[in-house]
Amino acid sequence: MFLLVPSGIAAATISRARLTGMEWRHARKQAALTAADVRTGLSINPIIPKVPGIALVQVVAIDGHVLAASPSARTLPVLSTLRPTPERPQLDVQACHPDPTGCLRLSAVLAGPSRGSPVVYAAGRAPGLVSTGFFDTFFAVQVAILIALTAWTTWQVTGRTLRPVESISRELGEINIGDLSSRVSEPPGDDEIARLARTVNATLDRLAVSRGSLERMLDRQRRFASDASHELRTPLAGLRAQLEEAQLHPAESDVPAVLKSALSDVDRLQSISTDLLLLARLGAATSEELLLIDLAELVRAEVTRGASACRRTYLNLEPGVRVRALPAHLHRVLGNLLDNARRHARTGVWIDVRLLGHLAELVVTDDGDGIPPDHRDLVFNRFTRLDTARSRTHGGTGLGLAIASEIAQVYGGTLCVADSPAGGARFVLRLPAACD
């Protein structure tokens, strides 16, 4: 729009100059022809104009007397008082008269070489359309109309272009954080607005997934807090009951038995607290703290530690299978798996270590009763006990397999239950193998 005003003014100036120049060229031509006739002594009264558009021609003597005129100029006063000189024998001028003559484009030519020679005036009326004032007004109005039309067109195009953006903004504003299932409308095509709508919907998809993950995590935390409080409350309640009984009836209390039971409850509280702290600290280790661990050596050390167990342990260990982890974490995983296998095995436990591509695999198998397929995912939940024979007093904390599974996930691995050839449970731990 800022280019239209100077462009319109330039066009108006050029057009006006071209029209005015053309009229004066015609006037000069007619004046020159008539002056030539005067010099040759031809009878030129009345003067017959020979150039189109030039109807007013007069030959005026030095005293202002009209010697000859064209039919249209016969009744008019002298067209101009301007007199050329021998130094400037031809002059152009625009003259406006208050009478009906109006504005003229006039050329004056000296018919002879002396100052007293007659002057030939040839003129054409300046039509209102091309007169200076009207011409300027016309182009000013034209530029104003053009600017207004351009502004209206720009407003329409901009409004039509931004309408989808307004729709996206309105629909996005109506989406509630409590319900991220709604999406904004995607206009057809592959322009910037269509890509914006797709980006907004993709962002909403990610927010919905993140919100779902957060809700599941919060739900697990709530259930975990509820289970943990229940697990801690049970030994605390038992310990308190025994101590209050001993305090109320000191003479009838068996102090050694009370102390033994109290220590058992304290041990259980300590075990639960230790497991809860371990769960809370998982994933806090930095890469600088991780060590290169040979799984075969880890298994031999753990089996030796529990050599007094009544179940035989069979080893099939591929050497050189190593992972990067904290030794305490892997000892805890293997210890939990071995304790679980020995507790349920009938005759023995089998441990295999091998390298599968870029994964290190550790398998612990027993020949016990096994785990039903529909319960295999449940064993990794916190405070889950599938064995009804195991009580909170004689069993574990209910966190062992949950801790083992979360440790595997911390190191980018998995822990799952598979079918066992021996008929019992078969726990498969897979971790990324360490590169040499």
Image (cartoon, rainbow, N blue to C red):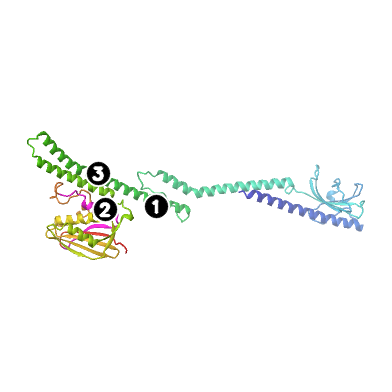
Q: As rendered, which of 186 and 35 lies closer to the eye?
A: 186
* First of labels 1, 3 by sequence position: 1
Q: As rendered, which of 130 and 297 lies closer to the eye?
A: 297
Name the residue beneath numbered marker 3: 225
Q: What's the distance in space between the residues labelled 3 and 2, CA to CA? A: 17 Å
x and y, in percent, of residue 84 in the image: 87, 51
Q: Is residue 412 magenta?
A: yes
Is there CB contact under 8 Å for labels 3 and 2?
Answer: no
Q: As rendered, which of 233 and 193 lies closer to the eye?
A: 233
Is 63 positioned to the left or the right of 53 in the image? right
Q: As rendered, which of 90 and 308 lies closer to the eye?
A: 308
* First of labels 3, 2 by sequence position: 3
Q: Is residue 121 magenta?
A: no
Q: Residues within 10 Å of mark 3 (few under 14, many from 20)?
A: few
Q: What's the distance in space between the residues labelled 1 and 3, CA to CA? A: 34 Å
Q: What's the distance in space between the residues labelled 2 and 1, CA to CA? A: 30 Å
Which amino acid type corresponds to the residue marked 3 in the rendered image? Ala
Tell me where the magenta segment starts and ends, as one range.
395-421
Q: Is residue 413 visible?
A: yes
Q: Is residue 42 visible?
A: no
Name the residue beneath numbered marker 1: 202
The residue that appears at 45% across and 52% down in the rendered structure is: 196
| Secondary structure under the numbered disc 3 in the rendered image | helix
x and y, in percent, of residue 121 in the image: 85, 51
Q: Is residue 36 above or below residue 224?
A: below
Name the residue beneath numbered marker 2: 406
Q: Residue furthest top?
A: 248
* First of labels 2, 1 by sequence position: 1
Is there CB contact under 8 Å for labels 1 and 3?
Answer: no
Which amino acid type corresponds to the residue marked 2 in the rendered image? Glu
Closer to the eye: label 2 or 1: 2
